[in-house]
Image (spheres, rainbow, N blue to C red):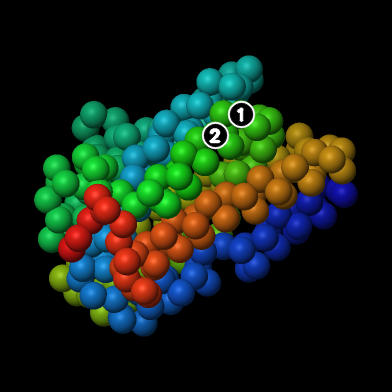
Amino acid sequence: MTPTDLEQRLRGVGPERYHHRHRFHLLMHEGKLTRAQLQAWALNRYFYQSIIPIKDAVILSRSEDPAFRVAWRKRIVDHDGDGVHPGGIEKWIQLAEATGLERARVVSGAEVLPGVRYAVNAYLELVSKHSFLEAVASSLTEMFSRDLISLRVDRLKLHYPWLSGGLTYFNARLTQAPEDAQFALAWVTEHARTSAEQDLAVAALRAKCDILWAQLDAIYFAYVEPGWPPPGALLP
C-alpha cells in the first residue's frame, strides 16, 4: 500500500473497533449510569491512565532516533506533569475524587478488576515485546479519541453536573491527543513499507482497541450486567 492507502486502512479501524461503541460508554452518554458505576469506571480507568507514561517511556527507550525521542517525550510530561503544572494522571485523580472516591483508594490500585489489570499488562507487553513499529502503531487509538472526548464532556456536564469540577483531564486531551496522533501516524506510514509491516501496524492498532474494549467489558460485567464484582474489587 501507499502511505495514503495505509492511513485510510488505519483510520478504518476506529469505526469498527474503537470503544466509543461499547455499551458502557453508550449508557454513560445517555445519563443512565449511577454514581457508583461512575466511581467503578473512574477507579479502574485510573489504573490504565497510570501506566501510560510508563508505556511511553518504554517506547522512548527503544528508539535510536533523537528526533523521535524529542517528539515522544512530550507524552510523558503530558501525563506526569512538569513539577509545576499537573499532568493527566493528577487530573484523572481529581475526576475520581469528584465521583466521591478518596485519592488514596484510587491510587493504591488495590480494588482494580482482574480483567482491567490483565488488559493493562497486555498493553505493556505489546509495547515492550513486539516490534517497535507495532509499539508506535498501537498508540494510534488517539486518532479516534477526540470525538469521543468531546461528546463525553458534553454528556457528563449534562447528565452528571456534580462531575463538572473534575473534567479538566478531558479538556487538555482535546488538543494533546490529535497532536500526538498526527506525529505517530506520520511515523508509521513512513516506516511501514512492506505489506507485512503494514499488516503488523494495522493489527497492533486493532489489538490496542481490543485492550480498551476488554477493560470496559470487565467494568460492565462487574458493575452493570450481571453486576458481579469479583473478590477484592471495589464495592461502591
Is 181 above or below relative to 57?
below
Across and down, in percent, residue 64 comes to: 63, 17
Question: Where is mark 2, residue-wise?
Answer: 125
User: In the rendered image, which quarter is residue 223 located in?
Assistant: bottom left
Q: Which mark is residue 129?
A: 1
- Tag 2, which secondary structure? helix
Is 15 above or below relative to 117?
below
Most foreground residue, 70 or 130: 130
- Tag 1, which secondary structure? helix
* Residue in view at x 72 percent, y 49 percent: 202
Answer with left or right where residue 236 lies relative to residue 27.
left
Q: Amino acid at mark 2?
A: Glu
User: In the rendered image, which quarter is residue 82 located in?
Assistant: top left
Most foreground residue, 97 or 178: 97
Residue contact at pointers 2 and 1, CB within 8 angstroms: yes
* Residue in view at x 63 percent, y 68 percent: 15
Answer with left or right where residue 119 lies relative to residue 104.
right
* Residue in view at x 41 percent, y 71 percent: 24
